[in-house]
Amino acid sequence: MSYLNKKDAVILLADGTIFHGKAIGDGGTATGEICFNTGMSGYQEVFTDPSYTGQIMVTTNAHIGNYGITDDDAESNSVKIAGLICKNFSEEFSRPAAQSDLFAYLKKKNLVILSDVDTRALVRYIRDHGAQNAIISTDVEDMQSLKRKLEDVPSMKGLELASKVSCKEPYFYGDENAKYRIAALDLGIKSNILRNLASRNTYIKVFPYNSSFEEMASFNPDGYFISNGPGDPEPLEAAIKTASEIIESNSPLFGICLGHQVIALAMGVSTYKMHNGHRGINHPIKNLITGKGEITSQNHGFAINKSQAIANDNIEITHLHLNDDTVAGIRLKDKPCFSVQYHPEAGPGPNDATYLFDQFIDLIKNSKKHTA
Ligand SMILES: NC(=O)CC[C@H](N)C(=O)O
């Protein structure tokens, strides 16, 4: 029997605009910030990326689900998006490595899935009108009650979400006999970051989002890492304090995405909510140190303030986004610390920027602890 019941469903945006679609499976109601990802592959990695917590995902590939799912492609232990909107949801899948179908995978979370949506029109609308909250529902008869529910959804600006996805207790990753030890602050860390670190001869202790510098330092790490994650970076007071103490200690520090924003905040540079974020796997970056371009994986809705970064004597901007000139990477002039707004670990996406993990290991090798 087909699970494509296709009940009528509605997408109501915060500005009152309505789009229509059909629910796949049982339907229901879901709320969150609506956003789109332009990647043509990598749906499982995107749906399990903790940075998407609280967001309803619109996919721009016309077909979703057609290559199934495999455990290896998960970026965390569960589906993290708040809802899914697509054009065609495939009932069939075909890939030798596939272990299961996407529908069964999403059903474990009772995810509300809408298909048969004019995703081109929806994406163009969001692109032009900017990020906003939305409600998706099969309760199409009662628009007034959907409107009321939507009004209660908190704005992404000011929203702290890292605590919802961070580990509750520290844990270890990799080979304990590895050469270097890394203390990682988990704001919603993706599995592929841990894989990339561990494959470079490191043993990692992963710490909860609100861990202090002292707690992390007691692992006696050779370097520190601050992860990606969901929500606004500004309310993450504990992480910002920990970042500034790591920087003060002159220890090697690398930050990705939310981690990059936290490092900027620790340096006194503010962050802001973008009109629309960058979410896709073909975002062009210029590395200002090498002059080379990189095609990168991105997923962010906030960015760091460029003029404040330029005015800060301790900061050098190392990477720029070529579409809109926003800051894509920084390094500190007198501290062994650097960070990027994008995703060198890919998962999904191109591997142009994996050199950044090597750069982090080089920073560790050249640090006082190792050259003393
Ligand atoms: N991938 C991330 O770490 C995202 C960071 C932050 N939540 C943003 O949207 O900008």
Image (spheres, rainbow, N blue to C red):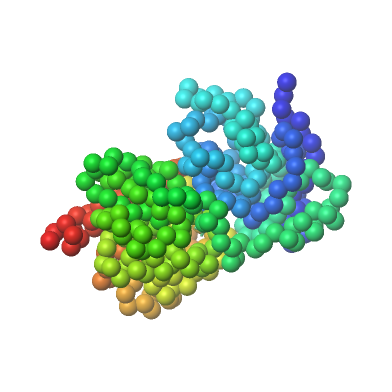
Image coordinates for residue 188, horizontal then vertical, percent: 48, 51
Q: Quadrant of residue 118?
A: top right
Depth check: give the residue in front, 262 or 124: 262
- On the picture, is 176 further left or further right than 139? left
- Can residue 89 be seen from the camera position used here? yes
- On the picture, is 308 further left or further right than 22? left
Depth check: give the residue in front, 287 or 12: 12
- On the picture, is 112 further left or further right than 321? right
In what quadrant of the picture does the C terminus appear? Answer: bottom left
Point 55% across, 29% down: residue: 68
Question: Is 314 rendered above or below residue 150?
Answer: below
Q: Quadrant of residue 157?
A: bottom right
- On the picture, is 12 further left or further right than 257? right
Depth check: give the residue in front, 247 or 91: 247
Report the number of numbered marks. Answer: 0
In what quadrant of the picture does the N terminus appear? Answer: top right
Q: Quadrant of residue 195?
A: top left
Point 66% across, 40% down: residue: 111
Image coordinates for residue 148, horizontal then vertical, percent: 80, 59
Point 70% across, 59% down: residue: 153
Question: Is 358 rendered above or below residue 213?
Answer: above
Image coordinates for residue 131, horizontal then vertical, percent: 63, 60
Q: Residue furthest left?
A: 372
Point 65% across, 27% down: residue: 91
Image coordinates for residue 307, horizontal then vertical, percent: 43, 75
Question: Is 195 rendered above or below residue 340?
Answer: above
- Can residue 196 be seen from the camera position used here? no
